[in-house]
Amino acid sequence: MLRTGQQYRDSIRDGRRVWMNGERVHDVTTHPQFKPLIDIRARIYDMAHEDATRDIMSYEENGDRFSVGLKLPYTQDDWHAKRRATDAVLEDVGGIVTRVGDETAGEMWSLYDGQDILNEVDPRFSDNIRTHIHKVIQNDPFHVSANTDPKGDRSKRPQDQDPDMLLRVVKETDAGIVVRGAKYETAAAYANQAFTKPTIANWGDSALSEYAVGFICDFSSPNLRFICRTGFTGRAPADDYPLSSRFDEIDALVIYDDVLIPWENVLFYQHTKAAGFIRNTLHRYSAFAFVQRNLKLADLMIGAALWNVRQTGLEKQQAVQEKLATLACYREGINAHLTAAITNAETSPGGLLMPNQSLLMTGRVHACSQLHHMMHLTRELCGGQICVTPDAAAFADPDTADWLKKFYTLNDNWSSDDRRKLLAFARDLLNSDYAGHRLTFQLFAQAPPFAHLGAVYRNFDFDDALRFTKKSAGLSDKVLG
């Protein structure tokens, strides 16, 4: 049922093999670069048990309580509840966290919609996806998604280079399939399981491929290794980098060194039709939570910009107001797409209620393609002091504190301490390694920009525009072909 934060921490003390900075990490829950995000994930679990947030974070069914984020969506109210829960989490922790489990559980719902295809392949796989969706609801794991391969030479077929460059099946046994290869995944080192699936492989006309495989991987499985990038936490004082010290989500290269996947965890295998279906529909649900995080990122940029111009008395200048209005348009554009996607939600092939796909995918393009412009606009409004202000230690040093107090105190309302905090926050939001990482993450986390546009192309209804233009231009029926 609903876990507590401590139960989550205990669940990932399972002997998993994790490395960072060339050293083995023996307990991710206490390691300084993993701990901040693990604490946030534990906090999310605990929020479902607290009086103030229990009814926002969880729902009751047959006398038990379950996570709102993991609930299968059948109504608009289900989606409104999910949105409220995500907002409650981000408000509580005070920042943006992307990989918390709700968005990645949604990727399994896409396969739930493809059960007719799975039944063509093997009815066991259709049973397996239903079973695992309900296991996630019942057991409340921290569930993530493993998509991205090391790539290799993409001009070649995977079998024409190192065959392990893309994850593949190397053997079948009575107990299950044995897989070999690697995947990149954010938060894998401190998650319980992943929905592992292929990237778009070069299958050509092949109907079967050992690379066309999707499964649930228990991250406590033997023969897994997690090789992580260095975290940002602890590289500089938290007073100077308040966001990166709390909200850095650690990415890992997950090595599958002949890992046994039990048959009951296999969701599809060999058939490229099933693999193609999941790649084309993977984000029909999970994109909602992904875009919603961008909404809160927009709020942070607007807040940082507006506080900066307000403290220096520039808020009434027309040029400043125009830039703030542009940021507001970006923010409300995301908000409008999310709201409209639920208002115009569609029944999915599996009987679920999915956000309107054209509006959701268009909203994702808007949120991601304009983000770097909005960050630069925010940078303009915050001004050059975000890159030249001394660190917090200088404000505390007796030899320099008085000078900094003199030059950073603006008036009775803005002390040097508040001004330094705001400038440090804006620097971490816009200029730091963490800021650059988040910008790249938003561009590629769900798919590269061209794939975002491809999803819009597949989901937008062009027929009505053709009909209306045909009528207005007086075209004959011959053009219909």
Image (cartoon, helix red, strand yellow):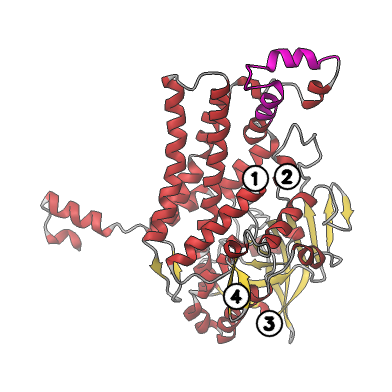
N-term-proximal mark, 1 vs 2: 1
Whether pointer 2 and pointer 4 mark residues with C-beta atoms closer than 8 Å, the reply is no
Whether pointer 3 and pointer 4 mark residues with C-beta atoms closer than 8 Å, the reply is no
N-term-proximal mark, 2 vs 4: 4
The residue positioned 23% from the left and 55% from the top of the image is 466
Label 1 sits on residue:
94
Label 4 sits on residue:
133
Q: Secondary structure at mark 4?
A: helix
Q: Quadrant of residue 404?
A: top right
The residue positioned 38% from the left and 60% from the top of the image is 343
| Image-based side of 345 in relation to 49, left or right | left
What amino acid is found at the position of numbered circle 1 in the picture?
Gly
N-term-proximal mark, 1 vs 4: 1
- What number is the disc on residue 263? 3
Whether pointer 1 and pointer 2 mark residues with C-beta atoms closer than 8 Å, the reply is yes
Mark nearer the viewer, 3 or 1:
1
What distance separates the C-alpha of mark 3 from that of mark 1? 41 Å
